[in-house]
Amino acid sequence: MSPLGPRRVLLLLVSIALLTIVPITASAQTQADVDAAARRQRIAEAKQTEAYKAYRAASERLEEVRIEYEAIHNEHELLLERMARMEEAVTRYTEQADAIEESARRIVVDAYISGQTQNFGAAFQAATIQDLVTTQALVDRATQVELATLDSLSAVTRQVDRSTTELEAHRVEVATAEDAAAVLVAEMNSIYEEQARILANADAALNDAIADYKREVKEKQIEDDRIKRQQAATASQQPGKAGGAAPAQTPGFICPVQGGASFSDTWGARRSGGRRHKGVDMFNTRNTPLLAVTDGRIKFSSNSIGGRSTHLYADNGVVYYYTHLEAHPTNISSGQRVSKGTVVGFLGNSGNARYTSPHLHFEIRPGGVAVNPYPTVRSAC
């Protein structure tokens, strides 16, 4: 045998690889997957709502604190202006005091020059301007206007001193309050920013949940379409059962779910334990009334797989099977004969369907053998 060349080796390896490739498909999407995504979206919506409420509360409180801070700050500014005006007044009165002091000294000099020396020594021993001008020698020479001005200066100076002390104390108090308000504003601003961050995360989580739900719905639709194609292929191989019951076997058939339902052709789809789906799943809200599709006798039963069930035995030998019921009606009894349109159960998800959305599993069994109910149900619902 001649050795294989590099090209032949490469072709052989490629051929082996192609033979061993197994198609990889996404996991089958079910209504339970869609429902789980919907629940996650509702949870995300609730969290986003709570985050928005907290964000609004923090924003409103921050605005209140800012207003309080502005009010305190404005009061502080007004106090500083008042103190500035008081300082100006003190300056003016100090200038007046200097002028009066100069006038008093001139009086002393005049008294000395004129020979009135008897109180001259006392004048120069005066400790203050008030002592100076009130010595007997100066009083004799001081005018009434000068004394009145001196009295006014003394009174106003005392008032200015008191007011300045009070304003300074109040200024310190307001400044302390302003500092505390500034700290509170900073704290509230930090809380506001944190709530804004939480809200942004909640918004992002909600957007992700919405996108996830849409993706699940789309993948479920893709899976449904795949199942339909598979069922169509299966139906071509089983024309008797997959094709459904003949119209003559279901005369006067009405929709088994009051008000209609959502359903698709899932005849023959794989189920747990190697079973095949032998009915049609009809989705609606829990406790939707289920109706007798024709006249006949009913039988109520219950088991771990189907849960609560109702068998309707038509007069022509066709059996209609309702299962996964939420409850049986209480106004009729098992074994009783009923007319078409009578409520024979309520839609639910009992049995092994307890983790799925509420639906009716419905079967048609001509002669006791199940056939695809989808064509018959589709024409009536």
Image (cartoon, rainbow, N blue to C red):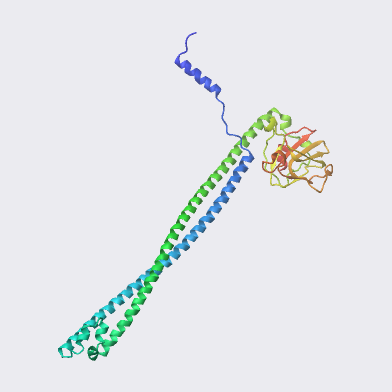
Q: Is residue 93 visible?
A: yes
Instruction: Where is residue 7? Give x, y as percent.
Output: 45, 16
Using the image, determine if residue 244 lies above or below residue 114: above
Give the residue displayed 60% in from the left and 37% down from the top.
222
> For the point 69% across and 40% down, which residue is it?
353
**In the rendered image of this protein, does residue 370 appear above or below residue 286?**
above
The answer to which quarter of the image holds residue 120 is: bottom left
Q: Position of residue 33 (x, y in %)?
A: 61, 40
Dividing the picture into quarters, in which one does residue 153 lie?
Answer: bottom left
Report the label total: 0
Residue found at x 50% / y 21%: 14
What percent of the width, then of the height, locates residue 253? 77, 41
The C terminus lies in quadrant: top right
Q: Identify the residue shown where x is 43% and y is 62%.
A: 180
Q: Is residue 66 left or right of residue 109?
A: right
Quadrant position of residue 233: top right
The furthest residue to the top: 1
Q: Nearer the viewer, residue 352 or 348?
A: 352
Q: Nearer the viewer, residue 72 or 284?
A: 72
Q: Is residue 366 left or right of residue 273?
A: right
> Which of the two residues, 316 or 36, is positioned nearer the viewer here?
36
Q: Nearer the viewer, residue 67 or 230?
A: 67
Whether residue 255 can be seen here: no
**1 is higher (above) or lower (below) than 158:** above
Residue 52: image location, x then y, percent:
53, 54
Give the side of residue 24 with respect to residue 109, left or right.
Answer: right
